Image (tube, rainbow, N blue to C red):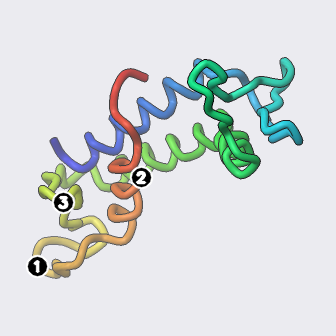
Amino acid sequence: MTAAEELRAAAARIRGRAEKATSGPWAATDSRCVDGPDGEHVVASVAARMLWPTAADAEHIAAWSPDPALAVATWLELTADRHAPHQLPTAPDGYAICWTCDKGPHNHVPAPCPDLAAAMAVVLAIPGGES
């Protein structure tokens, strides 16, 4: 799979999940819940006797509402579009050599492209599975 294909697949997973989620914006509440346009939601497992999330977890969950998630998906898609013409294969470490930013194969710099490295770091951190 090329780096561009990896970016588009991750963007599709993020976009699919965000579009199915309750619309934002979300906000953390004092009771460690997440409040959205349709009311407060508890993000905890009483049955498992876990008091989760902490206040910091609730703030983080609220920060990753659909709008920021969709913005990240768009950034991944734009990065894929910019780098796709070269259809670079993804290396085992998840990075690809970038000829787009390095101005072609004759000027190649061995370090990963900063654009691709940042985008691929997001791709590698996004859990797989269905959107």
Q: Residues within 10 Å of mark 3 (few under 14, many from 20)?
A: few
Quadrant, the C terminus: top left
Q: Which mark is residue 122?
A: 2
Which residue occupies 43% across, 37% down?
Answer: 11
Residue labelled with disc 1: 106
**In the image, is 88 to the left or to the right of 76?**
left
The amino acid at mark 2 is: Val
How far is the residue under mark 2 from the one under mark 3? 13 Å
Q: Residue 82 in the image: x percent, y percent?
A: 36, 54
- Residue 25 in the figure: left or right of residue 22: right
Q: Which residue is depicted at the point 28% across and 46% down?
A: 4
Q: Which numbered dot is residue 93?
A: 3
Local crowd at mark 2 within 10 Å, few (<14), some, or many (≥20)?
some
Nearest to the observer: residue 129 or residue 23: 129
For residue 59, the mark is none
Q: Is residue 68 above or below residue 79?
A: above
Instruction: Indicate which disc, 3 or 1, sits on the residue closer to the N terminus.
Output: 3
Q: Is residue 88 above or below residue 126?
A: below
* Secondary structure at numbered mark 1: helix
Instruction: Depth check: give the residue in front, 88 or 22.
Output: 22
The kind of secondary structure element at disc 3 is loop
Q: Position of residue 5 (x, y in %)?
A: 26, 40
CB-based contact (under 8 Å), mark 2 and mark 3: no
| Residue drawn where x is 81% and y is 27% of the image | 36
| Residue at horizontal 66 percent and vertical 37 percent from the top | 52
Reading the chain from its start, which is encountered first: label 2 or label 3?
3
